[in-house]
Image (spheres, rainbow, N blue to C red):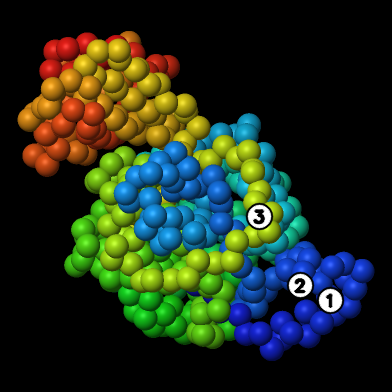
Amino acid sequence: MTPDLTSSPRHVRRRDRRLVALGAAAAMTAATALAGVLLATTEASAGTLTGSFYRDPTSAVNQWLAANPNDSRASLISQRIGSQPQARWFASYNQSTIQSQVTSYVNAANSVNQIPVLVPYMLPNRDCGGASAGGAPNISAYRTWIDSFAAGLGTRTAVIILEPDSLALQTCLSSTDKADRNSAISYAVTKFKQVNSNAKVYLDAGHSAWNSAADTASRLQAAGVSNAAGFYSNASNFRWTADEVNFGRNVLNALGNSNLHQVIDTARNGKGALGSEWCDPAGRGTGQAPTTSTNESTVDAFVWIKPPGEADGCAAAAGQFVPDLAYSLAQNGIVTSPPPSPSTVPSPSVSPSRPPSPSASPSAPPSPSASPSTPPSPSPSASQGTGSCSVSYRVDSQWNNGFVASVVITNRGPALTSWTLTWTYSGNQAVTNAWNATVTASGANITARNAAHNGSIGTGGTASFGFQATYSGTNTNPTVFKLNNVTCS
């Protein structure tokens, strides 16, 4: 999938409102008034988005940087990726906690007078069962989840990238399913605007090499885009910004609504796309830094929807942060100046809901990738061996009858030229597909063998792989693993 976000406000109309706001806030300090009034007292409208986006200190890349300050890759990753604002994905079905998670994230952004970018990624049958499969169990549950999500938005400006790939990728949906999805998306737009009139909601438009502009406009209209701020493109994809701008103009012409605008995902398009490859293609680079100054009258903002370094589902489980991916993107990326650091660094206690990377927005399939953008709530079940190996097993995303998991093997013994990892489930879990390993099953006994590229693990080295599986009842994590017939725990 490939969502995208762009915004380009025209500052003339905005200037009048700014002067009124500053006059009303004369008692405030100049610094606070200038940064805060725009967000707190100015009602956002399409084409007038102004301000800086929120840089989350708890994002996956910043967590990795904090834990690995001496890593040789850390400096460049910090400069090119960690310093930039990125979207937060909410992709783990959590009816009881979603409101507090949204509130925590939004409040953290508000505390430094920055604009939060949120990605609700919870529609039933998302990603058509692909790498970012999951979502709410049904449309009714989805609407309830949206109600709770909306309740956490507050009243200040927030950018909402609604359901990546939901409109561009519909090949698995019947006509009834499409109607239900359109109704659910339209409901979400209306609900968000009812609760927060300053919410800027954008719908999925795929990207310039996916569906035609006319077809995209038709899908957007059916989903209620007329009530939104516009649409986003290139989410989790790699298409050139210029191509997305031209595509967006054609979509806008087909829509015929001058109130609508576009946002573009520039997170990983610094080198353009690699043909039609959408799943962790090699040689890509970070793109234009997030900004509301796009110099394009039809574009509200350039944003980083898919966090660079989070896998699409091929290099690792969708949404998992992979340092090598981040480093490669940083090496090949556009050099941008880090945004000014906020005077106050928030320490939000957010429980990220990173999607299964909603996997990269495929140039074809979705990447919503979701970028998933925060690790799923299930806490990892790590089995630390005291011998020659240890294994970390983590459920990255889970829904009512399926889940995505990632496994990291650490070799503490002699160097290996190949490996086989085995474990046994206590329930009826069944692996349906895997990446970076060949996984087979004999009843509850699972065997994972290395892929061609990751068979060698030096002493102290690691290898990782991921898989998708089904289950019913309770999904209990395995606790005993064997690497080449040696028990790791």
CB under 8 Å between discs 2 and 1: yes
Which residue carries the number 1 mark? 22
Q: Examine the rendering and report whether any part of residue 127 can be seen.
A: no
Task: Name the foreground residue: 16 vs 81.
Answer: 81
Q: Are marks 3 and 2 in contact (CB under 8 Å)?
A: no
Q: CA distance from mark 1 to mark 3?
A: 21 Å
Residue 106 image point, x, y percent: 66, 51
Residue 57 left/right relative to 14: left
Residue at 31% x, 40% y is 317
Q: Which residue is mark 2?
A: 34
The residue wearing badge 3 is 109
Query: In what element is the residue under mark 2?
Result: helix
Name the quarter where the N terminus is drawn: bottom left
- Relative height, residue 382 to residue 296 (above, below): above
Instruction: First in sequence, mark 2 or 1: give its number.
Output: 1
- The answer to whether 2 appears left or right of 284 in the picture is right
Q: Where residue 315 sits in the image (x, y, percent)?
A: 25, 45
Picture layout, residue 433 above or below residue 173: above
Q: CA distance from mark 2 to mark 1?
A: 7 Å
Q: How far is disc 3 from disc 2 in space, using C-alphas? A: 16 Å
Q: Residues within 10 Å of mark 2 (few under 14, many from 20)?
A: some
Mark 3 vs mark 2, foreground winner is 2
Residue type highlighted by circle 2: Leu
Which x, y percent locates residue 150? Answer: 67, 49
The x and y percentages for residue 259 are: 61, 79
Q: Earlier in the sequence, mark 3 or mark 2?
A: 2
Q: Identify the element where label 1 is drawn.
A: helix
User: Disc number at residue 52?
Assistant: none
Identity, as a three-letter code, of the amino acid under mark 1? Leu
Q: Amino acid at mark 3?
A: Ala
Quadrant the C terminus occupies: top left
Residue 190 placement, left or right of 402: right
